[in-house]
Image (cartoon, helix red, strand yellow):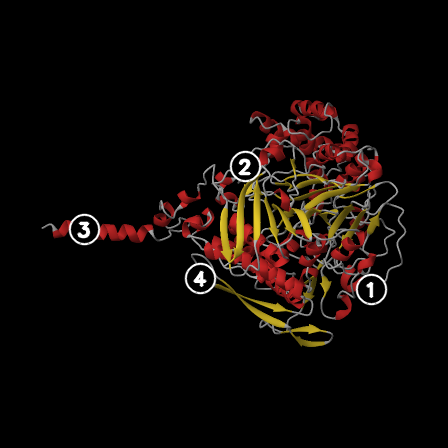
């Protein structure tokens, strides 16, 4: 009878083997995941792990070495450019493979392969936005240039060399958790990554859909007041008083614009699912030697992006016998993006310019094969049948038509569009053929101002403010991108797409982009504000941010004998310049007799506040909640007249209106109540309302600013892996303050470079070099960043291989 228990045991064992090697919903196959030889245990990296290695690859042309310092920063030395970028690709993949894979899959609209059905609409939007189409156009441009093609191909080979050498036990933890495998790299995937950056920094810099709705409820005068093109308090990137040349291209406004465009009152119900964060901005500035203690220029940059573990950036040095550059790179792409070499330093901020427009399209029928254009039915330029593979679900198909403007993003099958069911096509400069990568290749090697200008000319999208300093003493700042030349008002709203008259008529000539060199005042800065005042001869709409620039200019104007330490303090500055402007109005018009006891207590905290948004500040918390409540009181009733709601004005706009129109602010009245509210009423009611939330937070021990906003650096998978996040960081700031830290957004890399005879450079980002949560190098920079401290950046020389700062060496050769 022993056969019966044997059979039973065999059946149970077989069942367990089957069950443990099968994924169940979001649970990975537990057999492999828990395997001591292959599972997650293998991702726990020993504290004394040795990164040294001796490796050979057939694609290398010669010998090369990678020296790692005590912070795991690689200093790559190769005899030629192709080997240099092969090694950069290999190192990126070794430390950031999952990040590279995830971000490019998301860019292409393949998130459903990892996340399942919840990502289907996100993937549809990515494909309808034309992300792969944009990357394909960029790749064609790259392939036209033999140098670019060789460099990108070398990088791709380096990534794949690592992937092909990867053992199952060495696969990043996230692959084991999510139960999928690394995918081979390609030049197209690098192009996709760069287009994802373009989306992050240029796809959200317009409000065409929202403003189309706002136009239906506000007069043109009110619209211009609420959404001004040139704020009263603007301190532009190019100093005021600059004389600009006459426009090289003068676009012609269509004869039908007043009736078919400005006068049209259709409501748009389409909305973007994954609209980029409007706080995707940055600070950069440069001071001339005339204002520094050393007599050498100092350049500073801190790009403000979503903070993540691992970071969007990877710090490294790239060196050949003819060039050396140091700074941060983007895992998934070659070159140093922000940094310095032996001659110059450079940095970037976002231009915030509107480079994406929507056009109403009229299809002949549901087949979407023809659309009405210039008086006849025209065939679409192409139709893409998008196949969206879904983890745990059936494959989804979506048909995307491409017109002469670009892809049709919204139609009856995706995103309830205009009330009359017309479709919306988009034109976006990211779709134009371009090769942004070559800009950074040239910057990495540039020696002077002329070579810097030549390098940035090829950078089209996203528009960026490139700040520059050189050891010859020059300082400069160019706003660079491919910007449509618009007639006044063009692109603020959805435009008619039934003929060519509303299409872009050309681009602003590159040499006419706003720029400045060696100003008399001795400094230049950009902080996402409008680049030029009203004297600039082109219409340049965008989602500009004004307050940080005001603060930076205020501090730089009064500084002399500047040192790198002074610049560190400025990058970490918490002064709330917007509150400095607005608070006197709030204090003047609040009716203290009508405040609740709690509101009165918070008012006293605000009165005693020093206007610093530091981590321990209770005044910043009280003020910010009062301000948020006031904005809602003034604007919510008006903006809610459309569905979806019209966009709120910028904080700076509201502050300016309060300052100059306090006695008769027409928007203070709540149109939904029978009585007529005054600004004093709104200010008083707003503080009483804010006091309720403030009292609740105070009971929770969260009245201090950092505890209230809970600064957090999430893992790339966010809520899916909460244990891999860093929460409750003791930092202050806000999006309109120089140190622009919000809940999960802020300075993603702080860099300061003094261009003295021996370059003196400092930097830090809030993460670590490794993407492995099991490594001590996963988040070891965070505490330094939180404290506002920096690491000294070491531009290693080839002769310093024996320096004690070198902890590990990877040797590469052909074989």
Q: CA distance from mark 3 to mark 2?
A: 48 Å
The residue identified by callout 3 is: 8
In whole angstroms, how far apart are the C-alphas of marks 1 and 4?
48 Å
What is the spatial separation of the Cα atoms under label 4 and label 2, in whole angstroms? 36 Å
Secondary structure found at label 3: helix
Q: Which residue is mark 4?
A: 394
Indicate which label's residue lies in the foreground, 4 or 3.
3
Q: Secondary structure at mark 2?
A: loop
For marks 3 and 1, give the one nearer the viewer: 3
Asked if the residues shown at circle 1 and circle 2 are in contact, with their CB atoms under 8 angstroms apart, the answer is no
Mark 4 vs mark 2: give the one in front.
2
Residue 309: image location, x then y, percent: 55, 43
Q: Which residue is mark 1?
A: 253
Q: Quadrant of residue 573?
A: top right
**Which one is earlier in the sequence, the residue at label 3 or at label 1?**
3
Badge 1 or badge 4: first in the primary sequence: 1
- Counting the numbered discs, the total is 4
Q: Residues within 10 Å of mark 2 (few under 14, many from 20)?
A: some
Left or right of 734? Residue 771 is left
Instruction: Establish if 157 lies above or below 284.
Output: below
Compute the Cα span from label 1 to label 2: 52 Å
The answer to whether any part of residue 420 appears in the image is no
Residue wearing tag 2: 726
Q: Earlier in the sequence, mark 1 or mark 2?
A: 1
Mark 4 Cα shell of 10 Å, populated few (<14), some (14-19), many (≥20)? few
Residue reaching furthest left? Answer: 1
Name the residue located 53 percent from the left edge and 48 percent from the top edge: 810
């Amino acid at each position: 009878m022993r056969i019966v228990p044997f059979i039973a045991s065999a059946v149970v064992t077989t069942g367990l083997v089957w069950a443990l090697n099968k994924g169940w919903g979001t649970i990975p196959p537990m057999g492999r995941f828990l395997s001591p030889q292959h599972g997650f245990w293998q991702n726990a990296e020993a504290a004394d792990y040795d990164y040294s290695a001796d490796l050979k690859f057939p694609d290398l042309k010669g010998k090369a070495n990678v020296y790692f310092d005590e912070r795991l920063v690689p200093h790559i030395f190769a005899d030629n450019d192709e080997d240099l970028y092969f090694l950069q690709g290999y190192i990126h993949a070794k430390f950031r493979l999952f990040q590279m894979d995830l971000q490019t899959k998301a860019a292409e609209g393949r998130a459903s392969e990892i996340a399942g059905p919840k990502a289907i609409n996100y993937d549809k939007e990515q494909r309808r936005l034309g992300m792969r189409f944009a990357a394909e156009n960029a790749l064609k441009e790259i392939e036209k240039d033999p140098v670019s093609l060789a460099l990108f191909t070398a990088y791709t080979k380096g990534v794949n060399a690592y992937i092909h050498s990867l053992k199952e036990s060495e696969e990043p933890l996230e692959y084991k958790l999510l139960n999928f495998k690394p995918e081979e790299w390609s030049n197209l995937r690098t192009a996709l990554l760069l287009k994802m950056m373009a989306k992050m920094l240029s796809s959200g810099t317009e409000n065409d859909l929202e403003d189309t709705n706002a136009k239906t409820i506000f007069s043109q005068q009110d619209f211009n007041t609420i959404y001004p093109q040139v704020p009263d308090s603007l301190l532009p990137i190019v100093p005021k008083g600059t004389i600009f040349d006459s426009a090289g291209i003068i676009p012609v406004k269509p004869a039908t614009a007043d009736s078919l465009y400005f006068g049209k009152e259709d409501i748009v119900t389409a909305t973007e699912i994954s609209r980029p964060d409007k706080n995707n901005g940055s600070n950069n500035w440069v001071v001339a030697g005339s204002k520094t203690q050393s007599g050498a220029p100092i350049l500073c940059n801190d790009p403000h992006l979503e903070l993540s573990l691992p970071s969007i950036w990877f710090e490294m040095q790239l060196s050949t016998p003819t060039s050396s550059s140091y700074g941060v790179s983007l895992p998934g792409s070659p070159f140093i993006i922000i940094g310095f070499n032996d001659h110059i330093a450079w940095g970037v901020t976002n231009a915030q310019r509107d480079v994406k427009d929507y056009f109403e399209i009229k299809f002949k029928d549901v087949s979407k094969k023809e659309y009405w254009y210039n008086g006849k039915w025209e065939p679409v330029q192409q139709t893409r049948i998008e196949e969206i593979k879904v983890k745990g679900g059936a494959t989804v198909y979506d048909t995307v038509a491409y017109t002469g403007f670009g892809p049709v993003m919204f139609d009856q099958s995706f995103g309830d569009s205009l009330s009359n069911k017309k479709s919306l096509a988009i034109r976006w400069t990211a779709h134009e053929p371009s090769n942004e990568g070559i800009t950074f290749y040239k910057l990495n090697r540039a020696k002077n101002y002329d070579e810097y200008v030549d390098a940035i000319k090829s950078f089209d999208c996203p528009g960026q403010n490139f700040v520059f300093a050189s050891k010859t003493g020059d300082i400069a700042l160019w706003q660079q991108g491919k910007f449509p030349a618009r007639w006044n008002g063009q692109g603020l709203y959805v435009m008619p797409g039934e003929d060519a008259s509303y299409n872009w008529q050309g681009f602003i000539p590159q040499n006419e982009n706003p720029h400045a060199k060696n100003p008399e005042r001795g400094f230049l800065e950009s902080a996402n504000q409008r680049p030029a005042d009203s004297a600039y001869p082109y219409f340049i709409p965008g989602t500009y941010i004004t307050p940080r620039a005001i603060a930076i200019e205020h501090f730089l104007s009064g500084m002399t004998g500047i040192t790198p330490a002074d610049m560190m303090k400025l990058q970490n500055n918490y002064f709330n310049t917007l509150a400095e402007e607005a608070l006197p109005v709030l204090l003047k018009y609040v009716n203290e007799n009508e405040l609740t006891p709690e509101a009165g207590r918070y008012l006293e905290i605000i009165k005693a506040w020093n206007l610093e948004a530091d981590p321990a500040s209770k005044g910043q918390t009280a003020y910010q909640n009062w301000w948020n409540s006031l904005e809602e009181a003034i604007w919510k009733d008006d903006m809610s007249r459309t569905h979806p709601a019209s966009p709120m004005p910028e904080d700076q706009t509201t502050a300016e209106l309060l300052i100059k129109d306090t006695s008769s602010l027409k928007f203070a009245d709540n149109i939904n109540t029978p009585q007529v509210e005054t600004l004093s009423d709104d200010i008083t009611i707003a503080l009483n309302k804010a006091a309720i939330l403030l009292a609740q937070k105070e009971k929770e021990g969260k009245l201090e600013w950092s505890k209230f906003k809970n600064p957090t650096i999430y893992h790339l998978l966010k809520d899916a892996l909460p244990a891999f996040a860093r929460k409750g960081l003791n930092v202050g700031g806000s999006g309109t303050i120089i140190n622009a830290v919000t809940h999960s957004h802020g300075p993603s890399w702080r860099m300061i470079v003094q261009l003295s005879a021996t370059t003196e450079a400092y930097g830090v980002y809030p993460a670590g070099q490794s993407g492995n949560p099991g490594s001590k190098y996963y988040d070891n920079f965070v505490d330094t960043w939180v404290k506002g401290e920096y690491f000294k950046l070491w531009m290693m020389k080839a002769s310093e291989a024996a320096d004690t700062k070198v902890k590990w060496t990877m040797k590469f050769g052909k074989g």
